[in-house]
Amino acid sequence: MDDTIEDSLDYGAPTLVEGFAYVVAVEGETAWLEPEQTTSCGGCASASACGAKGIGTLAERLEARRFSIPHQDGLRVGERVVVGVSEKALVKASLTAYAIPLAVMLISGGVAQWAVGSDLATMAAMAGGLLLGLAGARLNAGRLNAHGELSPRYLRRADVAITCHF
Amino acid sequence: MKEYVLLMIGAALVNNVILARFLGLCSFMGVTTRIDTAVGMGMATTFVITVSSMGNWGVENFLLQPYGLGYLRTVTFILVIAAAVQFTEMTVKKISPPLFQMLGIYLPLITTNCAVLGVALLLVEGKMNFISSTLFAFSSALGFSLVMVIFAGLRERLALAEVPRLFAGPPIGFIVASLLALAFMGFSGMSTN
């Protein structure tokens, strides 16, 4: 049985990470969506369960993650839809946001340690490297965004009964 | 140079945060259902562990030790970690809103990840200088991410396998994790060579 499954899988095929979202507003050619709370790790649930209001609550967090897509398929407010981003986009986003600043920061710290050899100089160089890396991350994120690689895409309407497949 | 390389290999592979020290098991089991989410969580954790370890080193050496405030260590470290997570979240949101939409969900989870606090406390025990402690934290986090991605890959394959009903779900996940831990024990042989 395992052999059959192995042969039928194409690991090289492009895959989409799918998620559910609700249409919260439609403005002309643009539809605004809010991602549905996921339950795989309880991140949103823990933010809402902490009892704090305002910053960090579930509603605030979801609102902060609101995004827009071109209005199509006659979407209406309150509808539940399936959206997707490329699996590679998530990896690219992670590398942009975290790997670039970390790499620049560590290289700066290494050079400072080798050149000066004091803890304070290394700390200052790493702080500077971190800021420089964040600037680089911003540039790369802008480039990716300009190519549309970070934007979620509308895939289809979702039935109310369908749940997240995590 | 050689001591830094050995330090990094030791932190990432020999004394792996998850498989040797049993830290961060919540996210290890919770966020490893898919490789892409494991990569997202692993990278975010790597960033936060490294940045918070820098802050914790400064707090330990310039505040807690000189003023004899060691009994406040755990509380202070948690505060620094929460600040590092908040800083990361605000920065990602500022530099790119689309990035925040994709990665923002992982960040609040890191505040309560015991691996972050565990690495910070290990650094205090190690009494290392700044660059060594930062490299130790970075390597520990890389080891964490490596195991997360390997385990996510195994679980994706496991989802296609026929598992007896009694072992389906978390039980087979724990069995696979134990086999992975046994495999990583092989790295401990490196210390004798």
Image (cartoon, coloured by chain):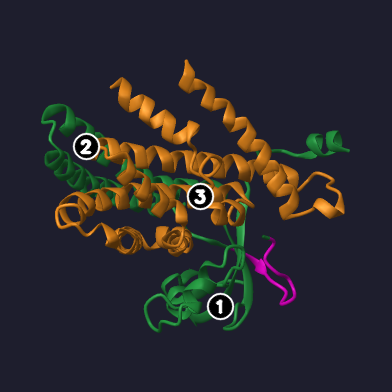
Chain colours: A green, B orange
Q: Main secondary structure of the magenta part?
A: loop
Q: Is residue A94 above or below residue A2?
A: below
Q: Is residue A70 visible?
A: no
Element class at badge 1:
strand
Residue underneath mark 2: A109
Marks 2/1 in contact by CB < 8 Å: the verdict is no
Pointer 2: residues within 10 angstroms few (<14), some, or many (20+)?
many
Question: From which residue to which does the magenta span run?
Answer: A154-165
* Residue B10 image position (x, y, % from top left): 43, 30
Residue underneath mark 3: B23
Kindly report which numbered mark, 3 or 1, lies closer to the viewer in this rendering.
3
Residue underneath mark 1: A23
**Residue type marked 1:** Val
Marks 2/3 in contact by CB < 8 Å: the verdict is no
**Which quadrant would the N terminus of chain B be assigned to in this image?**
top left
Residue found 41% across the figure and 82% down from its top: A52
* Residue A134 image position (x, y, % from top left): 27, 50
